[in-house]
Amino acid sequence: SSRCLHQKDFKEEAQWRQGPEKMLRLTLALMVTTALGRGEHFLGKNQKRNVTNATSAMQLVVASCSAYPKCVSLGLTSGTCCPSPGKDGKMLDCCQEGPTACSAYSSCVEQGHTEGTCCAEGSKLDCCQEHPTSCSAYSKCAAAGLSEGACCPSKEGQFLDCCYSAAPAKPAVAVGTECAIYPECVNVDLKEGLCCPTADGVVLDCCSGGSYADAAATDTASTAASEAAGAGPGPQGAAEGAAAAAAEEEVDADAAAAATADGKGKPPR
């Protein structure tokens, strides 16, 4: 029995000693797990620090002159053209055909197409992507020193911050200026945008006939006037007319009676 008690005491002592060791192992394991988690979080954050998710408030802005062959042909090989720099930047005429230059597409550049036009509608090469991808096509990327390779997206499929710009706010449209509300403008196929006046303040000839609302108001006024003219005098007017007629008849009767009396009182000639 003493031996059993000794073994029992030894077992309890061993369990007592193992308790802190287990706690220490659990604590170390928890610390390692937390550290790994933080490491993954940090790596993920670091990996995405230059990446922007496209939202409704952001848009890709291919502004570099070099992305537009027409601008390049005019000697505008660097800087920003589409739009031009500044708060009130405007799209130059050379931007009209879009960013179709070979240099704007990293895949084309990789195939040795570094000059000229590669991605014009109807004659696109296989290297053309949905939109320009070269860093140089985006003025913000070029300004940041990213003049070579792909940025939008990169080879890893990430869009850098410099690919985007805040979408410009749409100017407020004054009520009554839309082409679609003027019949004569619609008749000449001006169904969208501004006509009366245009965004540049020009009032088009098709505005002179008035809007649909103006025509409806004119028709309503004409109809009301016609109905009023055809309806004749109202009850009050009819009563007044009858009274005037009666008074006139009474005056005529008095005059006739007076004439008769005068005739009877005069001696014959």
Image (cartoon, helix red, strand yellow):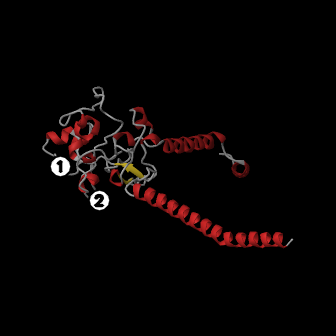
Mark 2 vs 1: CB contact within 8 A: no
Quarter of the N terminus within the rendering: bottom right
Report which residue position mark 1 lands on: 78
Asked if residue 212 shows in the view, the reply is yes
Q: How many marks?
A: 2
Name, please, the residue furthest toward the left: 75
Question: For the residue labelled by badge 2, is the local secondary structure a helix, a strand or a loop?
Answer: loop
Name the disc covering residue 221, or none.
none
Name, please, the residue furthest toward the top: 122
Tell me the mark number nearer the camera, choosing from 2 and 1.
Answer: 1
Give the x, y percent position of residue 206. 37, 39
Identify the residue at image location x=28%, y=28%: 125
Asked if residue 242 shows in the view, the reply is no
Judged left or right of residue 15, residue 166 is: left
Judged left or right of residue 263, residue 34 is: left
Q: Amino acid at mark 2?
A: Lys
User: Pointer 2: residues within 10 angstroms few (<14), some, or many (20+)?
Assistant: few
User: Pointer 1: residues within 10 angstroms few (<14), some, or many (20+)?
Assistant: some
Name the disc covering residue 87, or none.
2
Identify the residue at image location x=40%, y=33%: 189
Looking at the image, is 109 positioned above or below residue 26?
above
Give the x, y percent position of residue 221. 55, 45
Q: CA distance from mark 2 to mark 1?
A: 19 Å
